[in-house]
Image (cartoon, helix red, strand yellow):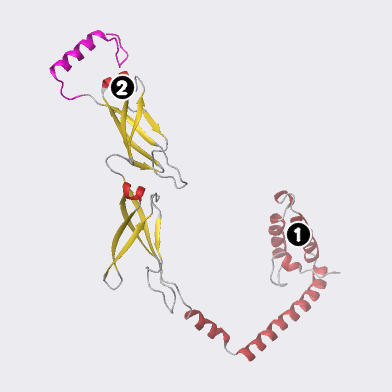
Amino acid sequence: MKYKDYYKILGLDTSRVSIDEIKSAYRLSAKKYHPDLNVGDTLAEEKIKDINEAYRTLSDSTSKRKYDRIWNSKNNINNYQKIKGKNIFHIFLGNVESESKETKIRQAIKGENVETEIKVSLEEAFYGAEKKISLRTIEGKIKTFSIKIPEGIRNGEKIRLMGQGKKGTNGGNNGDLLIKIDIEDNNNFKLYGSDLCTELKLSPWEAALGTKVDIPTIDGDTKIYIPQGIQTGEKIKIPNKGYKDGKGGRGELIAEVKIMVPKKLELDEEEMFKKLKEMSNFNPRGRKK
C-alpha cells in the first residue's frame, strides 16, 4: 500500500496530538474541501477521500498506534537525512550563512525616486512645449532641468527623467525624477478628459431668432448654427474640436449657452423692448398677463 502522511493531510505537524486535536483538524479540513464548496473540482474530491481515510485511521487508538510506528520511522529517516545533509553543507562551505548576510548588505541598491509637480497651460499641453524646472538637491544646491512636454499630454500624467532621483548605494543606479503634469484651465476653456468646455454668450434676439456665430476653439475659430429658441444652460457639442484623446483624434468642444441682457439700453432699444412687451404673449413664468 502506498504510504500517506495522514498527519500532513489533516494539517498536523506531529503525531503527538490528542483525539480532540485530531477531530478539530478533521473538521477544518473537511469543511475546506467539502464537495458543496468545491463543485466540479476533482482535486477536492480526491482530497476529501484522503481526509476521511486519515481521520478513520487516527481517530481509533489501536489503528493510530500501528500507523504511528510507520510514521515515526519515515520521519526519523527524513530528519536524519536533513541533519546529515546540513552538517556536510557546513563542513565543506564553512560559515555560509554569515557570508550570505554580508553579501546582501553589499548588494547594489537603486536610489529612491523623487516626485514633483509642474503646472502647464492648456495651450502648452495641447501643442507641446519645453519647460524648465528648478529643484533643490539634498546638498542644498539648485539644479535646473529642461523638460519636453509632448503634445497632447494627459492631465496627471508623469514625465520620467532617468537617473535624476536620489543616489544609489553600493554602486546601485540612481533613482528617477517623476514630474506630474498639472494642466491649468484658462479663461476660455476648462478641460474634462479629452473634452473642452466653454461658454457661448448670446443676445436675447440671437437666442430667440436663431443664428450662425463664430466660436473660438483652442486652434482657431469655427462657425456653428444656433437653433431658434435656444435656452440658457443648453449645451451645443462640436465634435473633434476638443483636446487630443491620445488615439490620434480629439474630443468635443462643449459650448454652454448663456443669454446676456444689456445692462444699459439705448433710447431706441428701450422703445423696441417696450413695444415687444406690449405685443408679446410670452411669459417665462407661465402665467397669463
User: Residue 249: x, y in percent?
Assistant: 45, 43
Question: Image quarter for residue 144?
Answer: bottom left
Identify the residue shown where x is 65% and y is 87%: 89
- Give the quadrant of the C terminus: top left
Q: Which residue has dot 2 on it? A: 207
Q: Nearer the viewer, residue 283 or 44?
A: 283
Please name which of the two marks, 1 or 2, marks the residue nearer to the observer.
Answer: 2
The answer to the question of whether label 1 and label 2 lie on touching residues, with beta carbons closer than 8 A, is: no
Identify the residue shown where x is 57% and y is 86%: 96
Q: Earlier in the sequence, mark 1 or mark 2?
A: 1
Question: Considering only vertical position in the picture, is 178 above or below 255?
Answer: below
Question: Image quarter for residue 245?
Answer: top left
**First to last magenta residue range:** 262-289
Q: Residue furthest right?
A: 1
Which label was assigned to residue 223?
none
Q: Nearer the viewer, residue 105 or 264?
A: 264
User: Residue 194: x, y in percent?
Assistant: 41, 43
Measure the alpha-carbon separation of dots 1 and 2: 77 Å
Question: Considering only vertical position in the picture, is 202 above or below 189?
Answer: above
Count the marks: how many?
2
Identify the residue shown where x is 42% and y is 77%: 169
**Amino acid type of disc 2?**
Ala
Q: Is disc 1 placed on a helix, strand or loop? A: helix
Q: Nearer the viewer, residue 224 or 203?
A: 224
- Give the quadrant of the N terminus: bottom right
Q: Which residue has dot 1 on it? A: 47
User: Residue 269: x, y in percent?
Assistant: 17, 17
Q: Is disc 2 placed on a helix, strand or loop? A: helix
